[in-house]
Amino acid sequence: MDSEFHYYITGFLAERAGFTESEAATIAYASDYVDYNCQAYEIKKKWGDSDGYCNEISQTMDIKKPRSERIHIYPLFHFVPGDPHADSAKRCDGKTHPLNTTPNSAKANIMIDAALSGEITGSDDKQLLHTIGIATHAYVDTWAHQNFIGIEDDFNQIGRDPKPNIGHADAGYSPDIPCLIWEDERLINPLIDNRERFIEAGMALFGKYLQFNEHRKIAARCTVAQMEGELADLLGYSSKASSMELNRFNRYGRYKQKIRFLEEFDPDKWWHQAVRHESSSYFWKVPKEQTQWFLFQEAVKKHVSFTLELIKPELEAAGIDVG
């Protein structure tokens, strides 16, 4: 998925499920920022400090990174392993893989439930919304990225595309675009309608958010039935690639009309609020604990720790030693 779902739809679902506009905006930004947190930094308080704060990335487009580094990114944030024998995973060649991503999998549910319950965050409530946003990203991607795995493997190959077989590289952006109709020739049922996948993901996420706010004794702003209609209307109709850009333009118009509390996504917002760049060094503008960027980065580290342990059996089944 891209910013359309990770930011706009996520924010919409969160607010309608009972989160305040401010809370929903933080969850949505954290969810989308997972895809933009692709640079490691060392940030210091002042000149002369020997050590600074180092963040951990949650996305990379550098396929040349060592496999050990990619293992700490793709399967944890974008391709959470699911049920390799799920009906939706049946392929023409009969292949299965222990790391195959399948929608709404048991491990993905454990992950997002742990984020919502505060288990991942621990005692630091200031990171709770950021942790929810990060887990939201990984959870809904189990629909968009189903039948791909987060390592380089021939299992991901579609046709004779020469690109490295990492994730859905061979499918390009097709799995991430709302309402796009495309084909995955590996599958017994190759015709894919992303609108169906994304609505299913959205309703599952809405249910998670509803449950969280019920525990807080906060009422939702719409029922499940109402949300089904609102989400379908917001996304619009399915289309093939020929009319993809026109439909995207129309969807963004609806987002601006229906989700007015969300400003246009700026991937540099939290970074610029927190950090200044001088020469070749980076420094905090204010105490780091007061910044959204720091809270997000701490949540990333906790997500990595929790989810890596969670999917360790699947990684080991795939022959990957994570120590």
Image (cartoon, rainbow, N blue to C red):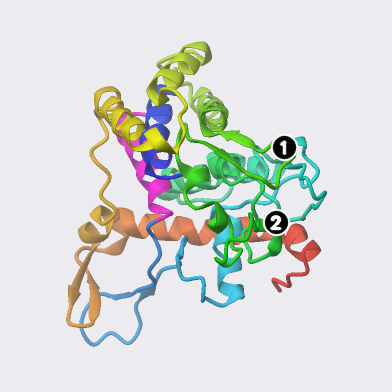
Is residue 23 visible from the viewing direction of this image?
no
Packing grade of label 2 (10 A; few <14, some 14-19, many >=20) is: many
Residue at the spot 80% in from the left edge and 50% down from the top edge: 93
Disc 1 secondary structure class: helix
Residue 166: image location, x then y, percent: 59, 63
Height in image: 248 above or below 48?
A: above
Residue 79 visible in image = yes
Front of the two marks 1 and 2:
1
Tag count? 2
Quadrant of the rendering where the C terminus is positioned:
bottom right
Mark 1 burial class by Cα count in 10 Å: few <14, some 14-19, many 20+: some
Q: Is residue 201 magenta?
A: no
User: In this rendering, would 128 be left or right of 205?
Assistant: left
Q: Which residue is mark 2?
A: 311
What's under tag 1, amino acid-wise? Ser
177 vs 263, left or right, is right
- The residue most toward the left is 278
Give the quarter of the image for residue 38.
bottom left
Q: Given the image, on which type of amino acid does mark 2 rest?
A: Ile
Tag 2's secondary structure? Answer: loop
Magenta span main SS = helix
Q: Residue at x 21, y 63 (%)?
A: 286
Label 1 close to label 2 by CB (< 8 Å): no
Q: Position of residue 70 (x, y in %)?
A: 56, 68
Query: Which range is magenta?
Result: 18-35
Q: Residue at 42% across / 35% down in the picture?
A: 10
Is 191 or 119 nearer to us in this picture? 191
Residue 265 as seen in the image, left or right of residue 126? left
Viewer-proximal residue among 59 and 24: 59
Question: In this figure, which residue is indicated by the disc labeled 1?
Answer: 88
Marks 1 and 2, the one that precedes in the sequence: 1
Determine the residue positioned at 69% across, 55% down.
Answer: 310
